[in-house]
Image: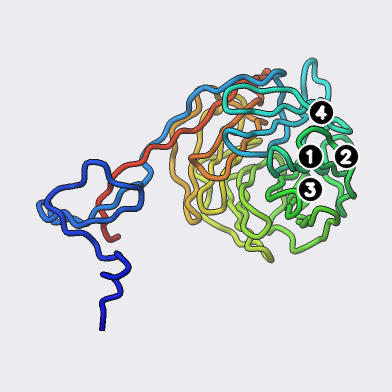
Amino acid sequence: MSDYNVIAGLKIKYLSADPSNPENGQVWYNSSTSKLRVAGILGVGSWTSGGSLGTARRILGRAGTVPAGLAVGGVGPPGSTSNLTEEYNGTSWTGTGNMATGLYGFASDGTQTAAYAAAGADGAQSGSQEYNGSSWTAGNSINSGRRYPVGTGTQTAGLIFGGVGSSATETYNGSTWTSVNSMNSGRSEFAGAGLQTATVAFGASTSTEDWDGSSWTNGNNLSYSASANAGSGNQTDALSIGGGPGVATTAIYDGTSWSSNPSLATGRSGSGGAGSSSTDSMVFGGSQPGNTAVTEEFVGTAAVKTVTTS
């Protein structure tokens, strides 16, 4: 019988030295060092400066990825509720269609061309809006009006959870909001990352909760105490960013535990975070405590690592 690993090319290579330019995911055995090696493991990354927002604001909404981010609403100068929308192209921000109603302290997510926003800090709003890449239109109301909740997912598969005095969770199908199982503990001014069926919530304390599409489970604590922090990434590769006036701390979540990450150049709270993974992440706006327009992008580095047991 033929050897499947040989036919499929899955046999680990036996080499006398590490290859000079390995591909991400490549695995080999180094006979000189007697070690199993793998390429593409992320090493320590860093934050780098991006283009500044056109208008500095805090407690704003977010959506998108790098380099296609979306900054929405917030509190602008001089403490007024903003309806501004700006799109990021990896270099600079450009203003587009204004929100139907200005908001701050609301839930949002999606992509640069298909985003949603719901709830808000002005009177525990229950309204929602949808963005199509150029303009906003009113959507159906959520079931539980609230202030300072968090949103994840997409415009047609969204998730909103928490808020001031609330642990309520609702899903969105692009038309209707449906109440589902609540969080284990209510919280506000916190962060989240992920999809409608796989989300992680963190901040407003050190506690973490994971959502599997039907229920919330308590996870390991965040490595620092954060309030009004930003979030980006997904349930198994998330970033907690800042959280408190002047706080520059960031941490990475691997789906089980949190670890320290290089700090921001500009500490902040109430900022927007966007990205689909820790290495596809950005943060923009926020308070130092004064409003800031600064954008930073996270750049990860790939490295060759030795495979060990633990």
Q: Which of the 4 image quadrants contains residue 273?
A: top right
- At horizontal 74% and vertical 60% (from top left) the residue drawn is 182
Q: Is residue 229 left or right of residue 27?
A: right
Give the residue at mark 4.
97
Give the residue at mark 2.
137
Give the residue at mark 3.
165
Give the residue at mark 1.
132
Badge 4 marks a residue whose secondary structure is loop
Residue 72 got which mark?
Answer: none
Spatial CA distance of label 2 from label 4 is 10 Å
Spatial CA distance of label 4 from label 3 is 32 Å
Badge 3 marks a residue whose secondary structure is loop
Q: Badge 4 local density, few (<14 within 10 Å), some, or many (20+)?
A: some
Q: Whole-percent x and y of residue 213?
A: 67, 63
Q: Which of the 4 image quadrants contains residue 69?
A: top right
Q: Disc 3 marks which amino acid?
A: Gly
Spatial CA distance of label 1 from label 2 is 9 Å
